[in-house]
Image (tube, rainbow, N blue to C red):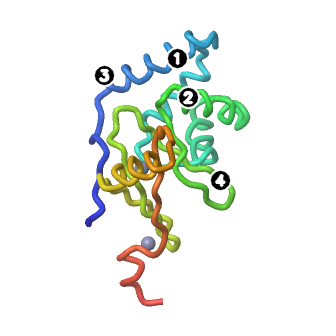
Amino acid sequence: MNSRDVSAGRRGDGELTEEMEVFREFLRDRGYRVTKEREAIADSILRNRDHFDVDELYLSLRSRLTISKASIYRAIPLLIESGLLAEVYLENGHMHYERVYGREHHSHLRCLKCRRIFEFSAPELAAVEKRISRLEGFKSEGHKFEIWGVCAACQAEKA
Ligand SMILES: [Zn+2]
Ligand SMILES: [Zn+2]
């Protein structure tokens, strides 16, 4: 199976607004304040189509506003709970995230040499999730599947 881009393509600002509204509604429902800072963090995440960690997010935000890493760390669980963001993989103790709202479920290949992340979609994994869950009497809510190793380009490179 070939890895391919399973993202929904470049999104217009209209869709970004929809996601931002989902986040605002989530905050209001939970009794959290809709602050400019939380909105700025959400906006930056929603514009990011890659897999990123807090350090990268912090660098991109810091150029535009005064913000602390701690406030980003506090906003992330809210973004995850609201369904806009998901944890993807852990590398050197740093969790990497990606935006998931409105996107097709997908899995990842991670190159240990160049650190690139490739996305792929494999419907048979959903069947495995169902089968194992049924077997174990488990009520599943999702699954994660990751392949790590060396990508084709890195293999082609001479050491
Ligand atoms: Zn590679
Ligand atoms: Zn991904």
Distance between the alpha carbons at the discs numbered 2 and 3: 22 Å
Indicate the position of residue 48 as horizontal and vertical percent values: 44, 41
Mark 1 touching mark 2, by CB under 8 A?
Answer: yes
What kind of residue is marked 3? Gly
Circle 2 sits in a helix, a strand or a loop, which is it?
Answer: helix
Instruction: Say above or below: 149 vs 6.
Output: below
The residue shown at (26%, 65%) is 2
Of the numbered discs 4 and 1, the one sitting upstream in the chain is 1
Check disc 2 and report the residue beneath it.
81
Circle 4 sits in a helix, a strand or a loop, which is it?
Answer: strand
What kind of residue is marked 1? Phe
Of the numbered discs 2 and 4, the one sitting upstream in the chain is 2
Check disc 3 and report the residue beneath it.
14
Disc 1: CA contacts within 10 A as few (<14), some (14-19) or many (>=20): some
Of the numbered discs 1 and 2, the one sitting upstream in the chain is 1
Distance between the alpha carbons at the discs numbered 4 and 3: 32 Å
Indicate the position of residue 150 as horizontal and vertical percent values: 45, 75
Disc 4: CA contacts within 10 A as few (<14), some (14-19) or many (>=20): few
Check disc 1 and report the residue beneath it.
26
Please tell me whether mark 2 or mark 3 is closer to you in this view.
2
